[in-house]
Image (cartoon, grey):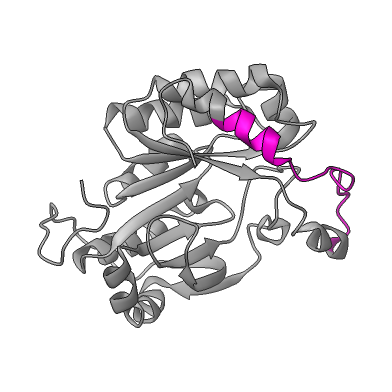
């Protein structure tokens, strides 16, 4: 199936919200190439309930931070890059923070994008309120789902929250056959236990809509942000995984019949 719908692709009409919703965003990246297929306009929303030890955007945590922007304002900016997105098989990705903390705002951005034939991708942990999150998926072409770990204790140590909402969200994506890419951050000494990785691989292999798995090696590019904000950075001495460690992880996922990169 094509990742980018043509401008003539028909979608079931969904009425717009009564007025242009306002959201809080941290920033945008106009020519992103790592958050979905093709060249993408990436919107980083403000606010997150997880406290991931390796987060490289800790400045997106505060629900009241960032800057307010209306959907109409954002769409005017998106339209400027429409040609680049469509010619490359790209589109719009909403990341964070956690986009699903602002579901009405995200839904309306995606609704308007799809009306213009622009591919939409949601980068999420799947943790926020499930009932409020569901309508966003009506206008989402691809979900980039971050599964931080599988062992419940490890997951809580990494994020500070329970794994159950994410697993429930993943199963729902499978049930509705929503195209999904799974993302897993490999952190030496934290998420790299083979049993933990095997657990994720088996679970992901049981889902019916996963197109591929992305292994994201840990890095310390966000360390300076933690220091600037006065947050204790627990991974200051943690190295980047070696090529051998990355390959071992990829092999575990591949052994379950999954496409990995």
Is 54 contained in the magenta span? no
- Residue at 62% from the left image edge and 50% from the top image edge: 48
Residue 217: quarter of image: top right
- Residue 231 appears left or right of 91: right
Question: Is residue 133 found left or right of 116 in the rendered image?
Answer: right
Query: For this rendering, which residue is in front, 185 or 128?
Result: 185
Q: Please tell me which residue lies in front, 242 or 165.
A: 242
Query: Who's the residue at 58% across and 19% down the image?
Result: 198
Q: Is residue 17 visible?
A: no
The percent coordinates of residue 192 (x first, y second) are 71, 29
Q: In this view, does 230 lie above or below 210?
A: below
Residue at the (27%, 65%) spot, across then down: 118
Q: Is residue 91 in view from this perspective?
A: yes
Residue drawn at (65%, 21%) of the image: 196
Residue 20 image position (x, y, % from top left):
34, 71
Q: Position of residue 185 (x, y in %)?
A: 63, 40
Find residue 222 and report its image quarter: bottom right
Q: Does residue 255 sit above or below 259 in this rendering?
A: above
Is 117 situated left or right of 82 in this image?
left
Q: Which residue lies furthest to the front in this view?
A: 244
Q: In which quarter of the image is residue 199?
A: top right
Q: Quadrant of the N terminus?
A: top left
Residue 82 at x, y = what percent? 30, 76
Q: What stretch is highlighted in magenta?
A: 229-250
């Amino acid at each position: 199936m094509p990742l980018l719908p043509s401008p003539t692709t028909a979608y079931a009409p969904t009425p717009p919200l009564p007025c242009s919703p306002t959201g809080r965003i941290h920033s945008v990246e106009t020519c992103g190439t790592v958050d979905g297929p093709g060249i993408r306009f990436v919107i980083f929303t403000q606010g997150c309930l997880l406290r991931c030890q390796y987060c490289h955007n800790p400045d997106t945590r505060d629900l009241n931070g960032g800057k307010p922007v209306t959907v109409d304002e954002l769409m005017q900016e998106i339209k400027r890059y429409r040609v680049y997105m469509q010619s490359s098989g790209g589109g719009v990705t909403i990341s964070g923070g956690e986009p699903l903390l602002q579901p009405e705002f995200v839904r309306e951005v995606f609704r308007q994008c799809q009306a213009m034939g622009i591919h939409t991708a949601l980068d999420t942990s799947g943790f926020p309120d499930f009932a409020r999150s569901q309508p966003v998926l009506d206008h989402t072409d691809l979900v980039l789902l971050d599964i931080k770990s599988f062992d419940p204790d490890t997951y809580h140590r990494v994020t500070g929250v329970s794994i159950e909402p994410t697993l429930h969200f993943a199963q729902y994506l499978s049930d509705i056959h929503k195209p999904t890419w799974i993302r897993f951050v490999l952190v030496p000494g934290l998420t790299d236990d083979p049993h933990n990785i095997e657990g994720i691989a088996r679970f992901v292999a049981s889902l019916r809509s996963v197109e591929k798995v992305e292994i994201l090696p840990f890095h310390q590019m966000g360390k300076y942000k933690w220091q600037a904000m006065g947050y204790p950075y627990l991974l200051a001495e943690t190295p980047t995984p070696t090529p051998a460690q990355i390959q071992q992880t990829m092999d575990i996922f591949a052994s379950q019949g999954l496409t990995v990169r």
